[in-house]
Amino acid sequence: MSRVPIMGKRIYQSDLTPDCWSIQFWGLPHCRKCEYLATDECGGLNIRRKILKGNYPVNGLPDAGD
């Protein structure tokens, strides 16, 4: 039987924007494995710009339970 790691994070809904939720949860590293990166379907262009300018946490929103 193989094991699959599961990641979890608690985020306040009020902190989320319409931008890519995966980036908001897991940060810029998530983009490396995203099938929509550099396509018209990418929903994270604005948030990626914010991260690269230093206006958003690189590793996503902090866990609300911390």
Image (cartoon, rainbow, N blue to C red):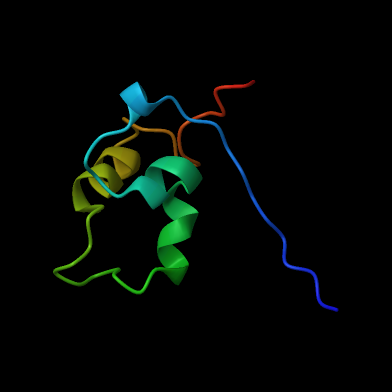
Compared with 51, 38 (above or below) is below
Compared with 16, 23 (above or below) is below
Which image quarter is the N terminus in?
A: bottom right
The residue shown at (46%, 32%) is 61
- Left or right for 11, reference 54: right
The residue shown at (34%, 41%) is 51
The spot of residue 14 in percent (x, y) is 32, 22
Q: Residue furthest bottom?
A: 1
The residue shown at (73%, 67%) is 4
Which image quarter is the C terminus in?
A: top right
The residue shown at (32%, 44%) is 52
Depth check, front residue: 42 or 52: 42
Depth check, front residue: 63 or 2: 2
Q: Residue furthest right?
A: 1
Q: How many marks?
A: 0
Which quarter of the figure has residue 64?
top right
Compared with 25, 56 (above or below) is above
The spot of residue 9 in percent (x, y) is 58, 37
Q: Residue furthest left?
A: 40
- Left or right for 14, reference 19: right
The spot of residue 33 in percent (x, y) is 46, 70
